[in-house]
Image (cartoon, helix red, strand yellow):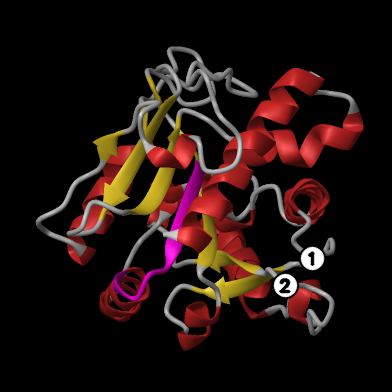
Amino acid sequence: MRRLIVLALIGSLLDLYVWVQKSSSDAPHQNSEFVYARIRYHLTFDAWQVREVPWHHDYPYSDETFPTVLGEVTNIKTDPTSFQIVDIDSPDLFKYPFAYLCEPGYLELNARDVVNLRNYLDRGGFILVDDFRTADTSQGRGAPKDDIANFRLQMKKVYPDRDFVRLDLSDPIFSTFYKIDSLDMKAPYVFPGQHPVEFLGLRDNHGNLQMVLNNNNDISEFWEWLDEGQMSMHDAATSFHFGINYVVYAMTH
């Protein structure tokens, strides 16, 4: 018990340290036409068990690679620092029409978060939700893993009358820039008993997507490891096709 308490304290202190640290992306983005927000959020109690603060996963390598590729293929003016860490309860979130949120299984929304997030989405903000899964075990430790159950619970605080919907190839988000011909994407890593990759969405009252969810997937892992030679070029290219489509959809709908 004493060991668990010490570990929990260390995890909490680490989270506090990362929370208050200023990001290297705080520099002005004078050369960018597009900057997105990586959302920093309040954590569930069990988040201390994770080897790294969940909202921070794949930072900053995926965040540097994705806008670079986005700029090269779309001619949108970007640079490797075209991202910003933004607190989920901050008014600064409204500066960024596109946001990225990862590992929502560890998200815990308080009352202030709920109001800010609802206002952000209602005003046209768009969130890419990445890196979460449902699996029969959690990294081989035996306990089941159901990240989307927690995220669904949290989003019910924001929109009690809405739920996630399964997306298919007929949805415009899969043809806004690249014509994606299959949603049978391969995840970069798979937990024992992990369920298949699926693409989900949250729609507003007009049917427009406010969120896209990469369930049982982690496309930013492909972005992070592109230069390391650990992922196939085909799978890496596919991950960028999805990400770029998400950005183009968000900025045109």
Query: For mark 1, what is the residue?
Result: 77
Quadrant position of the C terminus in the picture: bottom left
**x, y percentage for residue 251?**
52, 62
- Residue type highlighted by circle 2: Glu
Name the image quarter holding residue 160: bottom left
Q: CA distance from mark 1 to mark 2?
A: 5 Å
**x, y percentage for residue 179?**
56, 29
Q: Is residue 250 left or right of residue 86?
A: left
**Which residue is at 84% across, 76% downward?**
31
Q: Which residues are magenta?
A: 122-130
Q: Is residue 107 left or right of residue 33?
A: left
Q: Is residue 219 above or below residue 116?
A: above
Viewer-proximal residue among 137 and 29: 29
Residue 237 appears in the picture as rendered:
yes
Name the image quarter holding residue 177: top right
Question: Is the residue under label 2 in contact with that under label 1 (CB below 8 Å)?
Answer: yes
Secondary structure at numbered mark 2: loop
- Residue type highlighted by circle 1: Lys
**Which residue is at 89% across, 25% downward?**
229
Residue 1 appears in the picture as rendered:
no
Tell me the tag on residue 33.
Answer: 2
